[in-house]
Amino acid sequence: MSAAVQTLDISPVGRVEGDLDVRVDIQNGVVVNAWTQAELFRGFEVILRDKDPQAGLVVTPRACGICGASHLTCAAWALDTAWETEVPRNAILARNLGQIAESLQSLPRHHYGLFMIDYTHKNYSHSKYYEEAVKRWSPFTGTNYELGVTISGRPVEIYALLGGQWPHSSFMVPGGVMCAPTLTDVTRAWSILEHYRRNWMEPVWLGCSLERYEEIRSYDDFMAWIDERPEHANSDLGMFWRMSQDIGVDSYGRGHGKFVSWGYLPHEDKYNKPTIDTRAASVRMKSGVYVGGTDKHEVMSENFTREDVMHAWYDEPSGKHPFDRVTKPVVKNPTDHNAKYSWSTAVRHEIDGRLEAGPLARQLIAGGYHGEGWQHTDPLVLDMYKKLGGASVALRHFARMHEGVKLYREAEHCLREFRLNDPWYIKPTERDGKGWGATEAIRGALCHWIEVQNGKIKNYQIIAPTTWNVGPRSDAGELGPIEQALIGTPVADASDPVEVGHVCRSYDSCLVCTVHAHDASTGKELSRFRTA
């Protein structure tokens, strides 16, 4: 006889970006249903309405204290396409470098400050790796925790060389950038990169040189690499993977098996006169949709983007393309998990439905041979996905760790390709029109849409990675990516559901939380506790 369904309301989830609430139904120790709820309405789309077109360059980087460069990138490219500007190659490289530096900052902060802390949880005290995990990853006192959080501040020093500060710089503008780095600036940036590599990425993160790691092309290669030297097995990457298999986080968190990336890092010689239609063929890291069940790879077009609002707190037509949205929030927003329960829209692909965004999506798409022949291809994570039977908490985080090496190489490329005496800015001609700017923030697919009419912003829309991942059910009832990934998650202790946190944190990042548990039939609160 099946046990009764128990409902847990987790409000908010700790160490996950933004004010995320999660409700899960648990039966026989396994999650059988889930709802993800975005509790905070900020309304940048409403704030920017009727403002000067360039207001987005100042306002949208404040959308996030970690990914401001990604928002600034989107805001600048959106106006570039709307105004039909010409962007010098130096400016493209400087924009790319700023965003890469920010991503390299986020990588260790997420790993140590948000994700790996869970591996020190008492539930895993039986693991043969537990004692080392506590020594290495305990918050504030862990040896690698301290080093990782400290080293994370170095890459954004490069960003400050370009933008004067981090976060919240607005050095990217339509037509280029408002900086002109000197040889001294470039030399200093190289030294910062080298410090990041020599003092953390190689000895701690990988346990080997970047060159050796780049030789890994398949899951078999990776497992052989772990066994090749103690330094590999005991690196943060090797230790993470071995312990993940030991405690079972490689067995849940699957999700829909459908993924999206806008692609990112426009090529310095191929996107100088940007348009919406030419972008996908002009980025170094290719865009795409990957459908795991059919092994389909194809280029992603913004034309397929739709936003459902049946289960979101908006009073406007559902299923619209962002250019056609009006962003009309409801006045009162009571939570009804059978109706409206989130400030996030349900973003979907018009044909393929709900898609997961993030490092795993990027790496699965990098494994495909669609797109342009010169664009980046990397078969490792796609091979792992197929051989391991799909996505999981462990593979999702592995993709993030793996991506760091390529990001580092792209930063080197930017510094190598600067031509310091060439232009950094070409003044554009302001005009009315529609524009679109997209990139890949460290957490996934990010894009801005803008419509300029009579010299003012008529409509501004933002779809962030979290919108893709944390959105509620679609109008057709398809669960959001995190909701779907939570299904099947084992919960050993309903009064301390660390496994739910694993799934959510494999996508994103946030603060500490207070959790409430109540009986599904009576609604009576069972316990209240705080998790780190």
Image (spheres, helix red, strand yellow):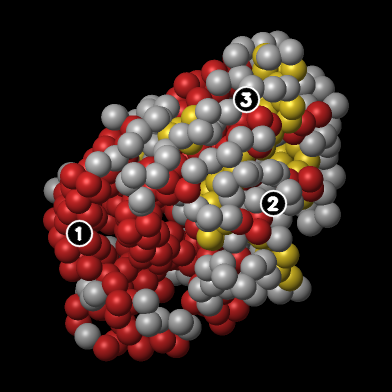
Who's the residue at 78% across and 41% down the image?
306
Q: CA distance from mark 3 to mark 2?
A: 20 Å
User: In the figure, 506 relative to 526: above or below?
Assistant: below
Disc number lying in front (1 or 3): 3
Q: CA distance from mark 1 to mark 2?
A: 35 Å
Which quadrant is the C terminus positioned in? Answer: top left
Disc number lying in front (3 or 2): 3
Q: Amino acid at mark 1?
A: Glu
User: In the figure, 357 relative to 214: above or below?
Assistant: above
Nearest to N terminus: mark 1 or mark 3: 1
Foreground of the two, 208 or 133: 208
User: In the figure, 527 relative to 101: above or below?
Assistant: above
Nearest to N terminus: mark 1 or mark 2: 1
Camera sees residue 312: no
Disc number for residue 429 = 3
- Write down the residue under mark 2: 278
